[in-house]
Image (cartoon, rainbow, N blue to C red):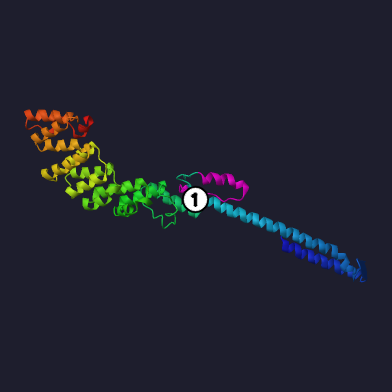
Amino acid sequence: MRIGLYIFSSIVFLIIVSVLTFLVNASYYNLQAFGMELNLPIAIWMILPVFILLIFSILHMAYYSAKNFFVLRRWQKDSETLDDLAYWSILNEPRENHIITENLKNIASLLSNSSLVAKEDFETSNEKIKDIINAIKLINGGTYVDLKAKKVSKQLSKTNPLAIKNSINRLQGDSKFAIDILATPNEYDDSVVTEALNIITKTQNMDKIKKYLPLMNIVNLENIFKRLNSGDSVGINEESIKDITGSITLACKDYIHLASSAMKFLDPKTMLSLFKSFEQKDENAEMAYLYLLLEYEMMDNAKEFIDSNPENNFKKLKIFFDLKQKQNNLKLQDIVSLSSLCEDA
């Protein structure tokens, strides 16, 4: 009901009634009660009850109008909260809800504990949700999206799948971003840091790679080995090899791989000196040291090393050693693969 129209109509009605009554009877009526005396025209007495009713009806309508206003306002606010919950669920970052409307609490709870995936043909009038869905499509398609411009980059956790995919997308197109990631690795998911390390080990020389060795594992190191085997020196030297072994825990096969890759670029004296020191500190390096002795055809030294380590089972290298004595031009790779040397170690 339109309260203004109701009040106006009621006042007009009261005026009409009072005027008609006054025209019929213009006399006064004296009311005495509780020691008080009130002398008013009969026309006033006629409209007084209706006027009192009007006042109370206005108060009644004002109360329920205000109540409905706040209910509607709360509903609208909760509706906006639901849109916000849906927005963050689409971003795989569900948020706690603060819904007051009882009928909306179940759907709000669901959105606060789930992630939504929009269909390809999904349409919505909510521009904010539409914009982020388009951004997600680009990210999943391999395109980097500036989430900072959309004011969500700081809202996404480092383990958020979209944040991870977006960072990797950026790495694919901007290798310099890898340096930014490795400068603050704790701010990124491990998979992003690993990808950054892969890019560094695939594109940079050892003078820059060594800075990030403490963050690396043997998987990252494989990239360096591949580059060495392909003929890229990577700027490797005696100090960088020491840095590698000092930062990453190597298994027997890793030492073999390192030795076979680095020997293409370092002289025998340096290689033997390095791996001699390694095998004295780490038994995992013993096979690699013996491998180098045999590769450099230092047979007397190899025999001496084998004899001085009777507890070790250098089965395949011992076989090669015996065959080498009879056939001088025999190569280790002719009878065994390097990757299998440590299987009997």
Residue kind at label 1, given as amino acid type: Tyr
| Residue placed most toward the observer, 46 or 225 | 225
Residue 182 coordinates in the image, percent (x, y): 32, 52
Residue 240 position (above or below residue 335): below
Q: Is residue 113 left or right of residue 305?
A: right
Image spot of residue 302 (x, y percent): 11, 34
Q: Position of residue 326 (x, y in %)?
A: 6, 28
Residue at point 17% right, 48% down? Answer: 238
- Quarter of the figure with the C terminus: top left
Q: Position of residue 76 (x, y in %)?
A: 59, 54
Q: How many marks?
A: 1
Q: Is residue 335 above or below residue 58?
A: above
Residue bounds of the magenta highlight:
90-113
Tag 1 secondary structure: helix
Residue 325 highlighted magenta (yes or no) = no
Read off the residue under disc 1. Answer: 87
Q: Is residue 307 left or right of residue 51?
A: left
